[in-house]
Every structure is written in structure tokens, then in C-alpha cells.
Amino acid sequence: MSELDLDLGRLVRLSTDDFSHTMNIGVYRGRASFTVFDNNVKGQGPVIKYLFTETSLCILKELLEKIISDDNMKPIEMSSHPYNRDTRQKEFRSSLSIGRDDKKSIYFEMVGEKHKAPLRFKLITDVSTHINGKEIPKKMATEFGAKTVIRAINDLISTGCVITNTRNPNGYQAPDPTATPSSMGSDVPLDTKAEDIPF
């Protein structure tokens, strides 16, 4: 790396309840990314990876803001179907669900093309802070966790995408005016109607 050695791949970290898997929220080569690792296998790459477009990152932020204010919001799934230039088709890569469990705690749940079993991560980003000598209740802790992810999107991820963009030596690539949504691998299908979007 350069003289400025930054680790932007782990801005926020979450774990499954049994600590078998870890989710890192950060930036990879100019894209916001959620990467899931199997803690029982050393030296292995991520078992699930979700790379965000600017639009899908805006959708994620909107969903997090909505679920913070709505205890009864039903789970909503986002899925990534990037365009494969070889097959000339969109192909499923991964999905990210956002919901509340039976105790109203907010969670992310992920599935990947090579990891079909869903992995759930409660949005608990801080276990060390106590209020008036008591642990923060899990429901409230996950709401603070959701706000932490929103803050990371606003303050850290956007800047990190510019810094780590390797497609241009200056860290920025102007949009291609000839690009179409299908060639860019949009996360929202072209035939989606407004009433199909749940917010």
C-alpha cells in the first residue's frame, strides 16, 4: 500500500450468535461491500460477498432508516445480479435481508451463490458500553447498530469508495454516458414497477 495504510474493509463488524461467521462492512476497490467469513476455516476468502452500487447503497440506507422507526416492518430482501459479459445474462451473486426477529432485534441475513444456507447477524456493533451501569437492551442495541451502519455509509464508506477506486489513478471514474442499467449490473430489474418497491 501507500504511505497512508488504511484498512477500509472492516469499518463495521458483526457476528452470528454462535460466532461461527463474521461479517465485515467496508469498502473494496471503490465499492461498498459486505463480506462474510467462516471463522472455523483459516486463510479462506469470504464465503459470501455483496458489492453495492451507489443506488443499492441508497436503498440500503433507506431500509435501515425505515426499520429503525418501524418495529413491525416485515423482512425485505435485496439481491445482487451482476451482468456476466461471457453469458450476457444477469446472474445471482448474493442476497441481503433486513428484518426484526421475534424479540424485535434488527438483523441482516445473507445468502450467497456458493453458500445457500442463510446466515443471520444481529446489528450489535458495541458490547462494551453500559448505560447507568447496565447493558443496553438488545433491541435498542441493534437500533444503535443500524444507526452506526448509516453513519458509516454517510461519513466513511462514501469517502472510502473514492480512495480505493483502482479504475482511475486519481481515484475517480466519470460515469460512462453510453452505459445502460443492464451493462452496469443494476440491482433493480428493469421491469420492476414502483408498486413493487416496499417503501
Image (cartoon, rainbow, N blue to C red):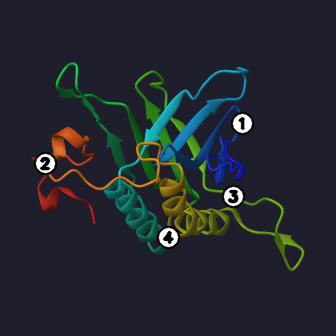
Looking at the image, residue 101 lies above or below residue 137? above
Q: Secondary structure at mark 4?
A: helix
Asked whether the beta carbons under mark 3 and mark 2 sit within 8 Å of each other, the answer is: no
Q: Amino acid at mark 2?
A: Thr
Front of the two marks 2 and 4: 2
Is there any visible trace of residue 100 in the rendered image?
Answer: no
Q: CA distance from mark 2 to mark 1?
A: 47 Å
Residue at left 19%, top 19%?
87
Asked whether the beta carbons under mark 3 and mark 4 sit within 8 Å of each other, the answer is: no
From the image, tell me which residue sits under label 2. 178
Q: CA distance from mark 3 to mark 2?
A: 41 Å
From the image, tell me which residue sits under label 3. 125
Is there any visible trace of residue 191 in the rendered image?
Answer: yes
Front of the two marks 2 and 1: 2
Residue 61 falls in image quadrant? bottom left
Q: Which mark is residue 68?
A: 4
Front of the two marks 3 and 2: 2
Identify the mark nearer the N-term, 2 or 4.
Answer: 4
Looking at the image, residue 166 lies above or below residue 199? above
Q: Which mark is residue 36?
A: none
x, y percent for residue 62: 38, 67
